[in-house]
Image (cartoon, rainbow, N blue to C red):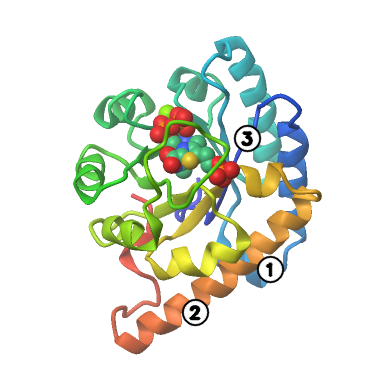
């Protein structure tokens, strides 16, 4: 497993009419075709297998097997949303849990100490607790309005995101309504990276969408590190929150 969490998290879109495997293939190809300089800054692509709540475990497992194989062949990181037994069954790199899933401490026990474990946090308090309980990164959202998922609270915006990033040292991944055009803003709010569904699965050319996201992430990361250096925040060029576990 890579020591550093990748900055682009592609979450599978299994809604009717979408092509999750096609998107993963396109994303992996775009990542491989990105310049070495871009990949050095953005790290491995992270693919999170997420199925609809009413999908069967069997469907989730079959998708996870395929995504895990594609990721392993490409050196990408494979995470499983919610269903940690599926993560174990396919030997994924880790999983992601939210408020209605296994508690973070229980998820850590299930996955073991070496796994990547993401937790959803919308406030600084929840974020601190999740980290204390074993989360190695946080997904923070909804940052912006999204049509991909129903029932979410009002968007946090950059200020709400910054309130969480400022409270923890683990990497924060911004989610909901994130597009290439918003990458600079979310990294300026302290995010390590972004998680996207619609920006890739709804794009006319998913590979090109990934290329643009990676380019924006690389540029914004370099700018943020330069700003940090100018402010004298870091001796080693990396903010503490960029390390995983
Ligand atoms: C990176 C990332 N952040 C947040 C979520 C949302 O998780 P959760 O709140 O458990 O909601 P569901 O995705 O399970 O519907 C995520 N999956 N990934
Ligand atoms: C799975 C998920 N969780 C969210 C949260 O805020 O917790 S938003 C979301 C879906 C994000 O999709 P898109 O990139 O298309 O906006
Ligand atoms: Mg969940």
Q: What residue is shown at x 52% (from left), y 57% (from top)? A: 7
Q: What residue is shown at x 27% (from left), y 24% (from top)? A: 106
The one of 230 and 140 positioned closer to us in this rendering:
140
Identify residue for label 2: 223
Q: Are marks 3 and 1 in contact (CB under 8 Å)?
A: no
Q: CA distance from mark 2 to mark 1?
A: 18 Å
| Picture coordinates of residue 21, whole percent (x, y) | 74, 33
Q: Secondary structure at mark 1?
A: helix
- Residue 23 lies in quadrant: top right
Q: Residues within 10 Å of mark 1 (few under 14, many from 20)?
A: few
Q: Secondary structure at mark 2?
A: helix
Q: Marks 3 and 1: which is nearer the front? A: 3
Q: How many marks?
A: 3
Q: Residues within 10 Å of mark 3 (few under 14, many from 20)?
A: many
Identify residue for label 3: 12
Q: Secondary structure at mark 3?
A: loop
């Amino acid at each position: 497993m890579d020591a550093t969490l990748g900055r682009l998290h592609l979450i599978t879109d299994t809604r009717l009419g979408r092509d999750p495997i096609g998107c993963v293939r396109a994303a992996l190809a775009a990542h491989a075709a990105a310049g070495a300089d871009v990949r050095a800054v953005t790290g491995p692509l992270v693919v999170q297998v997420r199925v609809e709540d009413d999908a069967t475990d069997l469907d989730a497992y079959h998708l996870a097997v395929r995504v895990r194989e594609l990721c392993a062949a490409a050196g990408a990181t494979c995470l499983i949303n919610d269903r940690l037994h599926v993560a174990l069954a396919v030997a994924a790199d880790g999983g992601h849990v939210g408020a209605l899933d296994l508690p973070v401490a229980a998820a850590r026990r299930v996955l073991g100490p070496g796994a990547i474990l993401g937790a959803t946090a919308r406030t600084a308090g929840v974020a601190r607790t999740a980290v204390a309980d074993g989360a190695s990164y946080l997904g923070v959202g909804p940052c912006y309005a999204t049509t991909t998922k129903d029932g979410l609270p009002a968007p946090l915006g950059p200020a709400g995101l910054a309130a969480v990033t400022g409270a923890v040292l683990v990497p924060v991944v911004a989610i909901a309504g994130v597009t290439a055009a918003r990458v600079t803003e979310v990294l300026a709010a302290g995010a390590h990276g972004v998680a996207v569904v619609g920006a890739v699965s709804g794009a006319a050319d998913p590979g090109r969408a990934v290329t643009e996201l990676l380019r924006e992430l690389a540029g914004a990361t370099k700018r943020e590190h330069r700003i940090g250096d100018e402010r004298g925040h870091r001796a080693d060029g990396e903010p503490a929150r960029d390390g995983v576990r």
